[in-house]
Image (cartoon, helix red, strand yellow):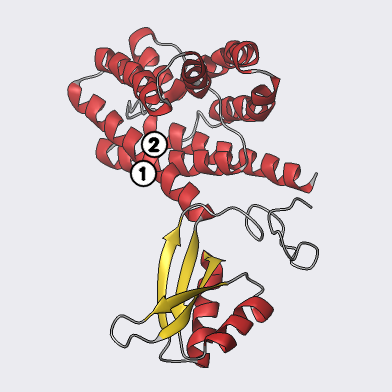
């Protein structure tokens, strides 16, 4: 229940941030950076349709398609975000435009929109829209997800090319890239970890600190020194990014000459990460479910 409440708060906050970025930076600068929102900007220029009303009007049909083609489970994950994001677009449509410089609007609008969507995704949901179409095409065609995304966003950009001059279309493509990059960096940054490879003459003391004080698992790997030919153990441990500075400092207190290599680990699964830590109850098989 606690996790569900947190997810709802994240989806609400992320949708609000994305809606603010959309209305205060993209709309008046005619930057159609993908999705139903981008399509709405182009259709507003072509037919005078209200952006917020169009996004709201497409919500229910898209949710029905989601239910019919993707199933109840996907619908439940998408439902709240699909409703709250268009609602915030409608509520914030009167916000003033922060800049009339299209390059600034494309970059910073993409950052704010990507930040908001990244928070929504971190809340285990999405804002629906063309994402539903993308999922349906990915499920029922042999096309990979990346290709489907390219096709869907390509169609939206093509429509913007009808509505706007080439310069504006290029700003839209730039903004779309910024949105994608921001989401990617957010998701990797929020979930990234670090592998530490440690070689030290005080390896047992370091191992004791990692397992007993830092409360992290560690592995001893037999190695052979390339120059000296001496056999010794290298310690490998995986930490969340925020744990690294403290553990690194403590290791250097134990042995200031310790050789430490820190390697990014974008995805880590298992005890202490995707599963709860419980060394006492499962001493022999750490992947045994609780």
Query: What is the residue that sits farthest to the top in this orientation?
Result: 47
Which residue shows up at 51% across the image and 18% down it? 139
Q: How far across and how far down the image is residue 164, in percent?
A: 25, 18
- Residue 25 image label: 2
In the rendered image, the vertical position of residue 176 relative to residue 69, given as above or below: below
Q: Place residue 277 in its image quadrant.
A: bottom right
For the residues carrying marks 2 and 1, which lies nearer the camera in this image? 1
Q: Residues within 10 Å of mark 2 (few under 14, many from 20)?
A: many
Can you identify the residue that label 1 sits on? 108
Q: Is residue 98 visible?
A: no
Q: Residues within 10 Å of mark 1 (few under 14, many from 20)?
A: some
Q: How far across and how far down the image is residue 24, in percent?
A: 43, 36
Q: Is residue 158 visible?
A: yes
- Residue 5 image label: none
Which residue shows up at 80% across the image and 63% down it? 281
Between 242 and 289, which is closer to the camera in this rendering? 289
Label 2 to label 1, Cα distance in Å?
Answer: 8 Å
Between 225 and 192, which is closer to the camera in this rendering? 225
Q: In terms of secondary structure, where does tag 2 sit?
A: helix
Q: Of marks 2 and 1, which one's residue comes earlier in the chain?
A: 2
Horizontal arrangement in the rendering, residue 104 relative to residue 79 (left or right)? left
Q: Place residue 11 in its image quadrant.
A: top right
Q: In terms of secondary structure, where does tag 1 sit?
A: helix
In the rendered image, the vertical position of residue 236 relative to residue 44, given as above or below: below
Between 246 and 270, which is closer to the camera in this rendering? 270
Q: How far across and how far down the image is residue 85, in percent?
A: 58, 29
Which residue shows up at 69% across the image and 25% down it? 73
Horizontal arrangement in the rendering, residue 287 relative to residue 111 (left or right)? right
Q: Place residue 152 in its image quadrant.
A: top left
Residues marked 2 and 1 touching at CB (< 8 Å): yes
Q: How far across and how far down the image is residue 142, in percent?
A: 42, 17
Which residue shows up at 38% across the image and 32% down it? 26
């Amino acid at each position: 229940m606690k996790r569900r409440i947190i997810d709802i708060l994240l989806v609400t906050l992320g949708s609000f941030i994305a809606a603010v970025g959309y209305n205060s930076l993209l709309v008046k600068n005619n930057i159609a950076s993908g999705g139903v929102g981008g399509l709405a900007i182009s259709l507003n220029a072509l037919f005078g349709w209200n952006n917020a009303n169009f996004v709201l009007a497409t919500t229910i049909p898209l949710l029905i398609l989601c239910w019919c083609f993707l199933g109840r489970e996907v619908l439940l994950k998408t439902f709240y975000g699909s409703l709250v994001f268009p609602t915030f677009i409608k509520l914030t449509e009167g916000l003033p435009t922060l800049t009339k410089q299209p390059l600034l609007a494309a970059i910073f609008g993409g950052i704010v929109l990507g930040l908001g969507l990244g928070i929504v995704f971190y809340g285990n949901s999405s804002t629906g829209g063309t994402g539903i179409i993308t999922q349906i095409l990915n499920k029922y065609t042999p096309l990979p997800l990346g290709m489907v995304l390219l096709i869907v966003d390509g169609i939206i950009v093509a429509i913007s090319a009808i509505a706007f001059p080439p310069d504006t279309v290029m700003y839209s493509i730039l903004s779309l890239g910024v949105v994608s990059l921001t989401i990617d960096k957010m998701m990797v940054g929020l979930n990234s970890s670090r592998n530490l490879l440690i070689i030290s003459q005080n390896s047992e003391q370091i191992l004791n600190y990692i397992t007993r004080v830092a409360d992290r698992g560690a592995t001893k790997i037999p190695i052979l020194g390339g120059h000296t030919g001496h056999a010794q153990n290298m310690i490998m441990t995986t930490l969340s990014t925020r744990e690294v500075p403290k553990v690194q400092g403590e290791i250097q207190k134990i042995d200031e000459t310790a050789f430490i290599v820190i390697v990014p680990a974008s995805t880590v699964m298992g005890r202490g990460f995707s599963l709860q830590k419980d060394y006492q109850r499962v001493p022999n098989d750490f992947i045994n479910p609780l």
